[in-house]
Amino acid sequence: MKSLKTLSLLILSLVLFCSFSLKDSPSYVGKWKGKDKGDIGYLTLTKDGYALFEFDGQIMGGKSFTRDGTEASMHYEVEKKENYYHIDFIVKKVKDEETLGTLQGIFKMNSESQMVLALGFDGSARPTNFETDQITLNKID
């Protein structure tokens, strides 16, 4: 009888453990590829909150890069809204974490492997829709 209780408890524990398996990271984490006005670019969002933009072999962002002669890093922050996400790309000095600039945007996930991103460039406000300045990105890694 005692072994039956132990076996039942073990099976129940396994069922509960397997049914509550968690994803390692959100679907937006990864490397994304997009085409804008004929130019191909990449966006990488890491699990630990860093962002990298890559165009024409030039990389901007990550844990350390040089911006105007200053060592900087680029982080991202995401906030879930009802039908989309807010995303902020924040560039800070590595030395003292002073914020050098913020690029605000929105994105939505069409699927786990496709996102639509709209950014407010040149210090403009966060976009409120996906009608202008948007790019479709496909996950490659």
Image (cartoon, rainbow, N blue to C red):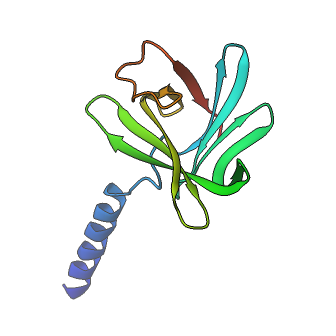
Q: Position of residue 8 (x, y in %)?
A: 24, 73
Q: Residue at x 64, y 48 (%)?
A: 61
In the current view of this chain or complex, which residue is farthest to the right? 57
Quick check: 124 above or below 66? Answer: above
Going by the image, does 50 lie left or right of 7?
right
Q: Foreground residue, 15 or 115?
A: 115
Of the 4 image quadrants, the one containing the N terminus is bottom left
Q: Foreground residue, 111 or 102?
A: 102
Is any atom of residue 64 visible in this view? no
Going by the image, does 111 lie left or right of 20?
right
Is any atom of residue 119 visible in this view? yes
Going by the image, does 99 lie left or right of 93?
left
Of the 4 image quadrants, the one containing the C terminus is top right
Going by the image, does 123 lie left or right of 12?
right
Q: Position of residue 33 (x, y in %)?
A: 65, 30
Q: Residue at x 33, y 64 (%)?
A: 17
Q: Residue at x 37, y 35 (%)?
A: 85
In the current view of this chain or complex, which residue is farthest to the front? 69
Q: Foreground residue, 4 or 21?
A: 21
